[in-house]
Amino acid sequence: MGMISTLRSVVRLRRYERDRTLRRLSKVADVGDLRAMAKKRMPAGCFDYIDGAAQDEVTAAANVSGYGDYYFRPRVLRDVTSVDTTTTLFGSDVPVPLMIAPTGFDRIAHSQGELAVARAAERAGIPYSLSTMGTRSIEEIAAVSDGRKWFQVYVWRDKPLLKEMLERAAVSGFEGIMITVDTAVLGRRERDVRRGFSLPPKVGLDTLVDGVLHPRWTLDFLRAEPIQFANVKGSADVGDGSTPVTLAEYINSQFDPALSWNDIEWFRENWSGLMMIKGVQTVEDAEIAADMGLDGVILSNHGGRQLDFAPPPIHLVSPVADAVGGRTSIICDGGVRRGSDIVKALAMGADACMIGRAYFYALGAAGEKGVDWVLDFLKAGVEHTMALSGIGSIKELNRDLIEVRD
Ligand SMILES: Cc1cc2nc3c(=O)[nH]c(=O)nc-3n(C[C@H](O)[C@H](O)[C@H](O)COP(=O)(O)O)c2cc1C
């Protein structure tokens, strides 16, 4: 008796979480944990499509480790009882300087795919970007989200198709487009090459075995309607993604390798909203974009999936900010895994960051609740970093906060 009451006084029983997904998430501490969980739950080929990158994946790794060269110069004894992570992005407030990067084929991670991510983004109050290669359509996204939305486009050979998509995005209330300019041809993603990976995933003997090893994913995949490139379906000569093709075959036949700055002018004639280019990797190109009056440049190497040995975006932030800061918005995209990464990019001169894999892993690990979790985690991380470095608001962030080490 005495022992039990002693025990009771020292042991506080944790409340049992009934929701399976939340129970799983309660053991997650960071994006690395989400990645590990996604890896366990998804067939290997699907996980590798998300996790993999071009060739030796040097740039993909450097995108993440690049933040490691930036140390803080924290100031102490400053009242940080209230830390405000709100800032303005393209004329409206965002609760945290963060956007969702466009990714193709989200339904490979979870049947809700892009819908889950768009809903989570709206709840978090941050802009969502839908990929042209999305597996949910412009209209489906607009139907589930009144939040801020961007549409990502490639320079398709088929201009009438492109024009039709822009019109649909305008009707559906997308505030801007981002033109991805780093994909003249598809990067060589050797994990996909090795597996002969196709989209949608083909069912062969190896995938059947994989399916048995990943029963929850397989059930979810089989129960949902077939995966398609939702935005280009119905266009007879383009292919809707319902027949398995390797991504390289598809993209190299559909995208125009002749894309040039003239195409940016074409977009301006066919789109009246905000416009950014995604995939800027030098100061020179950022300057051309700013001179052309674009609303933003997205410093990005496509998460290391295009040109290996392209520079990590965090290293581009300060030279680009020196050249064009104040004339056009600067978005740092690639390798963001923590709130502190976002604080670093902003201190160096970026206006916001974007995330790709961080939410894609979350989707694979725990569906929509996983995406909610990672967005909360990043916002809390920004707040926490600011509090520990004596910063009360986003406008106080500048290079005094950072010491760059080689
Ligand atoms: C699985 C996957 C699919 C992607 N698909 C697209 C796409 O369709 N269009 C595009 O512009 N970028 C695409 N990207 C690149 C992302 O928009 C973003 O630039 C990149 O993920 C940022 O790096 P991070 O994953 O380290 O955050 C994709 C990235 C991943 C991981």
Image (spheres, rainbow, N blue to C red):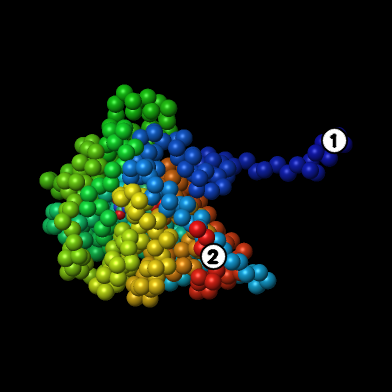
For the residue pair 402 and 143, the one nearer the viewer reads as 402
Q: Is residue 86 above or below residue 372?
A: below
For the residue pair 124 and 225, the one nearer the viewer reads as 124
Residue 122: horizontal and vertical position, in percent? 41, 59
Residue under circle 1?
3
Residue under circle 2?
403
Q: Residues within 10 Å of mark 2 (few under 14, many from 20)?
A: few
Give the amino acid at mark 2: Glu
Residue ranking furthest to the front: 406
Work out which quarter of the rendered image holds the N terminus and state it.
top right
Could you tell me how far apart the alpha carbons at marks 1 and 2 are, in whole angstroms? 55 Å
For the point 52% across and 60% down, the residue is 405
Q: Is residue 60 above or below residue 75?
A: above
For the point 56% across and 47% down, the residue is 29
Mark positioned earlier in the residue sequence (1 or 2): 1
Q: Quadrant of residue 89?
A: bottom left
Residue 300 in view (yes/no) = yes
Label 1 close to label 2 by CB (< 8 Å): no
Q: Residues within 10 Å of mark 1 (few under 14, many from 20)?
A: few
For the point 15% across and 56% down, the residue is 258
SS for callout 2: strand
Q: Is residue 187 above or below residue 396?
A: above
Q: Say whether residue 217 is left or right of residue 67.
A: left
Q: Say whether residue 250 is left or right of residue 358.
A: left
SS for callout 1: helix
Residue 335: horizontal and vertical position, in percent? 43, 53
